[in-house]
Image (spheres, helix red, strand yellow):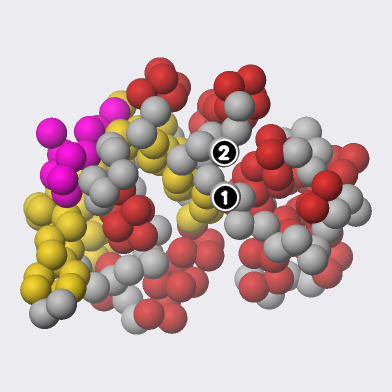
Amino acid sequence: MIKLEDIKKSFQINREDFTVLKGINLEIHSGEFIGILGRSGSGKSTLLNLIGFLDSRFEGVYEFDGKSTRQYSDNELSRIRNKNVGFVFQNFSLIEEMNVKQNVELPLMYAGLSSKQADEEARNSLKQVGLEEFLGQSVKVLSGGQRQRVAIARAIVNQPRFVIADEPTGALDSKTSYEIMELFKELNQKGVTIILVTHDESLTSYCNRVMHLLDGEFS
């Protein structure tokens, strides 16, 4: 599904080039639960942005379903991202002025679904994460674990090919972290490819393959 060949990424800081990714090679197959383990500053976020079609300025080749991303325009990549990728972040990234269902519906509205269709899909997605009774609840009053479940429901509501989970348990206690990781495990067993990025080695027990990222390279 995903193939990266000799991926390099640099930034210019004070007129000096700073290389973040140094020749990354990676293949991710449909249905995998892959872990990318690395400390802060290792290049994890940069790699995630690239895999999630958020950054198209890099050296090397990124193939998705056998086709180079260079062949797509920015608008086409945006459509591919909205259809195929779900994102889950450490800070949840919910809109607090919206209730639970409205947060989950957001990707569907961008995709052009009708209000009726979006309502149905959001309800189904929230049921998968055990929050079907929280539809009209303000996200402001939810616990950390509940917020992350809402974020996961939003990530999977478009039935994406893969989910990128960036430190998804970083703001949670150990019990809630376990519950969230079990939820990812269930989603993976249903066919969703999971790309877990973390610095917590204990979470990699859920993965069928683990890559170690150090200073922009896999070790």
Relative to 83, is 109 on the left or the right? right
Question: Can the viewer see residue 127?
Answer: no
Snapshot quadrant of residue 73:
bottom left
Q: Secondary structure at mark 2?
A: loop
Name the residue tied to disc 2. Answer: 171
Residue drawn 43% across the image and 24% down it = 203
Q: Is residue 153 left or right of residue 196?
A: right
Rendered location of residue 159, percent (x, y): 60, 50
Q: Is residue 108 above or below residue 158?
A: below
Residue that appears at 39% across and 28% down = 200
Q: Nearer the viewer, residue 176 or 106?
A: 176
Residue 212 drawn in magenta: yes
Residue in view at x 63 percent, y 71 percent? 111
Query: SS for tag 1?
Result: loop
Q: Residue at x 46, y 64 (%)?
A: 81
Q: Say what amino acid the circle numbered 2 marks.
A: Ala
Q: Is residue 163 left or right of residue 112?
A: left
Q: Which mark is residue 135?
A: none
Q: Which residues are magenta?
A: 210-219
The numbered disc on residue 91 is 1
Is disc 2 in contact with disc 1, using a CB cutoff of under 8 Å? yes
Residue 147 in view, yes or no: yes
Query: In the rendered image, which quarter contains the C terminus?
Result: top left
